[in-house]
Amino acid sequence: MSEKYVLITDESTGKDLRLPVVEGTEGEPTLAIKALPSTLGYFTYDPGFSATAACTSRLTFIDGGKGILRYRGYPIEQLAGQSSFLEVAYLLLNGELPSEEEFSGFSEQITHHTMVHEQLNHFIAGFHYDAHPMAMMAGVVGSLAAFYHDRMDMENPEHRMLAAQRMIAKMPTIAAACYRHHMGRPTAYPRNSLGFCGRFLDMMFSVPAEKYEVSPLAARVIDLLFILHADHEQNASTSTVRLVGSTGANPYACVAAGISALWGPAHGGANEAVLDMLSEIGDISNVPAYIKRAKDKSDPFRLMGFGHRVYKNYDPRATIIRKACYDVLDEMGVDDPMMDLAMELERIALEDDYFIEKKLYPNVDFYSGIIYRALGIPVSMFTVMFAIARTVGWVAQWLEQSKEPTRIGRPRQVYSGPTARDYVPMEKRS
Ligand code: SDX
């Protein structure tokens, strides 16, 4: 039972209510408001859920003020520097870092599930060649429910874990197939002798006519980016997966919903929007005019890759990616003017009172596209890269929710429409 309470008083009636304080192991305390409607007759109103916790979770902790991000208690900086994407996937799914034997078994499991049903390739072939890959991903991943729906017992934890592992394993295969459809190339099948990221690069860029050598640098950098994008507590797409999961929907349908939510430019679609924005700005001399536009309330333009609902400090992932940008461009001998432009945009913005007062800093999406571009990933695939990585977080959060008794998510509203009125027959209407 809660030890702490917050007393609220309805001044119109003088009635009091002691709301129990719910505290986690870290982070802001919350008020359990369930008794509010039955006691004082009020619901709460919080558009965008800025001040509302929808669940408890043991997976990821963010301290927005201090710019802290930890997966299962491990700082993102340590995981980025010492772990691998598959090890992070194991950690998020299971709660602890794996032993060598556990990791080997998990890697084998993921490798074993990289293939997709051949029918899926006909599904992909049905898209127009210039379909946006995120539209294809949402459709194709959702269709996986048709391949596994009847054989999945949602009450069986082993079936749930298998579904989670299947999605982690198949996302790169589906992503690469969508890209190759767009390029007019035949599907490349996963080469299970390669690692997770090398296998993805091979499925993306290999051509039947010649041997493809995976760049160790590219595989290493993508592994780092996948670690950084793996999970981020209750962001919009993860909350979507949880909400869809709360209805008992098929996990593939839950992830397809997450993909759709991620696509928005306010969320994971921002990495693509950043490159489009930098291309539109074009030259460092134009930066001041765009900063001016970003500050103008009458102008819908926003600085893409800047700002965050939780981080009111530097996004720790952006710090890591910014450094990786330098290392990758340096190691590849690439001199990308977009990097110079991004750095100048960041410098000017961070010196501007508007961005300082509103605590708007670069987020995970500001620099990631520059690395993807250097690796030859097309802009339209940037959010797909985010989705491949975030699938780990989505399925880990879905698994966590599915282990606990969960009530269907069903927010309330403040009704602002017409009050009761009678129907008027067509002939009597004015
Ligand atoms: C991701 O939630 C997550 O964890 C997401 C994510 C994850 O890993 O899952 O971290 C990934 O989605 C990162 C965010 C990527 N999106 C962008 O980079 C798009 C540009 N950013 C903004 O649209 C915005 O900052 C959001 C969507 C990220 C956050 O929006 P909020 O929390 O609703 O903030 P807000 O819109 O209320 O902004 C607060 C103020 C506003 O001004 P006022 O109304 O107070 O005068 O800051 C302004 C905004 O106009 N503002 C910006 C701005 N972001 C906020 N002004 C100019 N440029 C911006 N980018």
Image (tube, helix red, strand yellow):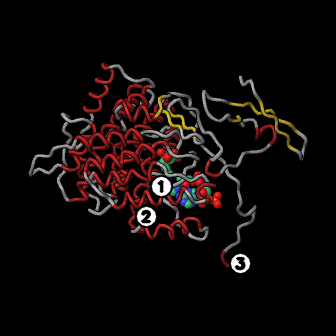
Is 237 or 4 nearer to us in this picture? 4
Circle on res. 428:
3
Q: Is mark 1 within 8 Å of ligand 1?
A: yes
Q: Earlier in the sequence, mark 1 or mark 2?
A: 2
Which three-letter amino acid code belongs to the residue tagged 3? Answer: Lys
Q: Residue at x 37, y 43 (%)?
A: 225
Q: Is residue 38 left or right of residue 176?
A: right
Q: Residue at x 43, y 31 (%)?
A: 92
Residue 332 place in picture, x, y as percent: 25, 50
Is 128 or 425 nearer to us in this picture? 128
Q: Is disc 3 placed on a helix, strand or loop?
A: helix
Circle on res. 305:
1
Residue 269 place in picture, x, y as percent: 43, 55
Asked if residue 266 can be seen in this view, the reply is no
Is 255 or 300 nearer to us in this picture? 300
Instruction: Check if mark 1's residue and mark 2's residue have beta carbons within 8 Å.
Output: yes
**Residue 202 falls in which quadrant of the image?**
top left
Residue 179 place in picture, x, y as percent: 27, 54
**Residue 272 falls in which quadrant of the image?**
bottom left
Q: Outermost residue toward the left? A: 209
Which three-letter amino acid code belongs to the residue tagged 1? Answer: Gly
Q: Which residue is under mark 2? A: 277
Q: Is disc 1 placed on a helix, strand or loop?
A: loop
Q: Nearer the viewer, mark 1 or mark 3?
A: 1
Q: How far apart, in angstroms, are the residues tagged by discs 3 and 2?
A: 54 Å
Q: Is residue 270 left or right of residue 380?
A: right
Q: How far apart, in angstroms, are the residues tagged by discs 1 and 2?
A: 10 Å
Q: Earlier in the sequence, mark 3 or mark 2?
A: 2
Which three-letter amino acid code belongs to the residue tagged 2? Answer: Met
